[in-house]
Image (cartoon, rainbow, N blue to C red):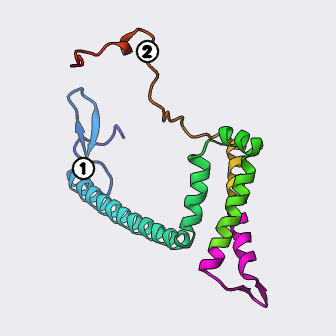
């Protein structure tokens, strides 16, 4: 503030006034500022709402594009998610090593045989064709191989599913399981 200016004028080309405060100091006052600030606030809020609408529209477009991209692969994604987050491979690897690989292999061959009976015919891959049973067997082997790979990945990443107790809780050792709780036999 310039001390040579009298109170009441600012010396500027705008509508600011210099006023004395209750403490005896000078301050700038703009009678049109409150209305201008209100207009600016309304304008900024309008711009913010428009931006949020565009953001919501773009987010919806992104979700729809991703859904169209993922739609053909949903079954494979469910397969991978199951073997990654629903199976505890810390328990399954020892079972496979003890001999569980043999029933798994026989089960895979049986699935390929049934599949080849249901959907008979060769698989055309460009100028090459795979015979009826063999392409189904390769597909089943790929599914089993992907499950084993995801099990290996679970061990590497260290993300295991939560423990779920399927058995009934054992009887407590306090002798409460031997009386009838008021239900006497007749």
Q: Classify mark 2: helix, strand or loop.
A: loop
Q: Residue at x 26, y 53 (%)?
A: 37
Q: Is residue 119 above or below residue 23?
A: below
Residue topped by disc 2? 172
Q: Classify mark 1: helix, strand or loop.
A: loop
**Residue 93 lies in what quarter of the image?**
top right
Direction top: furthest residue: 174
Q: Is residue 167 magenta?
A: no
**Residue 161 lies in what quarter of the image?**
top right
Q: Nearer the viewer, mark 1 or mark 2?
A: 2
Percent position (x, y) of residue 156?
A: 73, 43
State the quadrant of the N terminus.
top left
| 72 horizontally vs 155: left or right | left
Count of numbered labels shown in the rendering: 2
Foreground of the two, 180 or 129? 180
Q: Which residues are magenta?
A: 115-143
Residue topped by disc 1? 30
């Amino acid at each position: 503030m310039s001390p040579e200016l009298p109170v009441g004028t600012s010396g500027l080309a705008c509508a600011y006034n210099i006023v004395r405060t209750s403490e005896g100091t000078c301050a700038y006052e703009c009678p049109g500022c409150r209305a201008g600030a209100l207009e600016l606030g309304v304008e900024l809020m309008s711009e913010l709402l428009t931006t949020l609408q565009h953001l919501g529209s773009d987010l919806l477009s992104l979700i729809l594009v991703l859904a169209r991209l993922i739609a053909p692969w949903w079954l494979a994604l469910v397969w991978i998610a199951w073997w990654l987050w629903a199976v505890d491979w810390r328990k399954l690897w020892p079972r496979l090593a003890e001999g569980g690989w043999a029933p798994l292999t026989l089960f895979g061959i049986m699935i390929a045989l049934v599949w080849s009976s249901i959907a008979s015919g060769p698989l055309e891959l460009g100028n090459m064709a795979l015979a009826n049973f063999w392409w189904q067997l390769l597909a089943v082997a790929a599914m089993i191989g992907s499950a084993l790979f995801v099990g290996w990945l679970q061990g590497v990443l260290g993300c295991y599913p939560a423990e779920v107790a399927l058995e009934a809780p054992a009887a407590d050792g306090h002798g409460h399981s031997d009386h009838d709780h008021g239900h006497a036999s007749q």
